[in-house]
Amino acid sequence: MLKTIMMTNGLYKTTLKTRLKTLEEAEGVSYGVMVLHDGRMFGGGPFFYTVGSYTCFGNGRWKGEMIGQEHTPALATRLWARKVVSLAFAGTYDELTLETQGFVLVGKRSIPFKMDYRLLQAD
């Protein structure tokens, strides 16, 4: 019998890693916070904010989508500086951590990303 694991509503620390494959591979890392509550997510970091929704499947799997945009002008070298981007992901979770992999759609480019979440404060 499978144990049902519920996703914990609360405030999470996030680590986002992106990889841009060009002639030279560049990897970006950013940190932020995210509030997850009953299928909705809100958060961001020093330059960007994200809002979105997610679905949990009770077996430790989840998926979702987000929209991201700058709230403070970032260096033009950041992947989605001055752009509105869409993020789609799927991943796994337990009571304290969430892991996702997905793609950031920046214009016509699809950039792979990995985001890890660590629960800081439960609701």
Image (cartoon, rainbow, N blue to C red):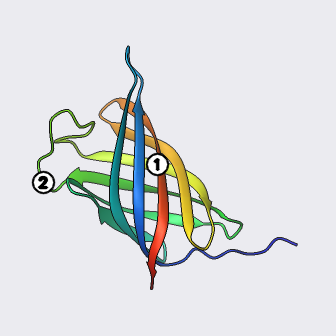
x and y, in percent, of residue 35 in the image: 38, 72
x and y, in percent, of residue 62 in the image: 59, 61
Residue at which label 1 appears: 88
The C terminus sits in image quarter = bottom left
Describe the element under mark 1 as helix, strand or loop. Answer: strand
What's the amino acid at mark 2? Thr
**What's the residue at 38%, 14% (across, down)?**
23
Packing grade of label 1 (10 A; few <14, some 14-19, many >=20) is some
**What's the residue at 42%, 69% (across, down)?**
12
Marks 1 and 2: in contact by CB < 8 Å? no
Is 107 above or below relative to 21? below
What's the amino acid at mark 1? Ala
Is 5 above or below relative to 33? below
Residue at which label 2 appears: 72
Q: Extreme left residue here?
A: 73
Quadrant in the picture for residue 91: bottom right
x and y, in percent, of residue 83 in the image: 21, 42
Q: Nearer the viewer, residue 90 or 74?
A: 74
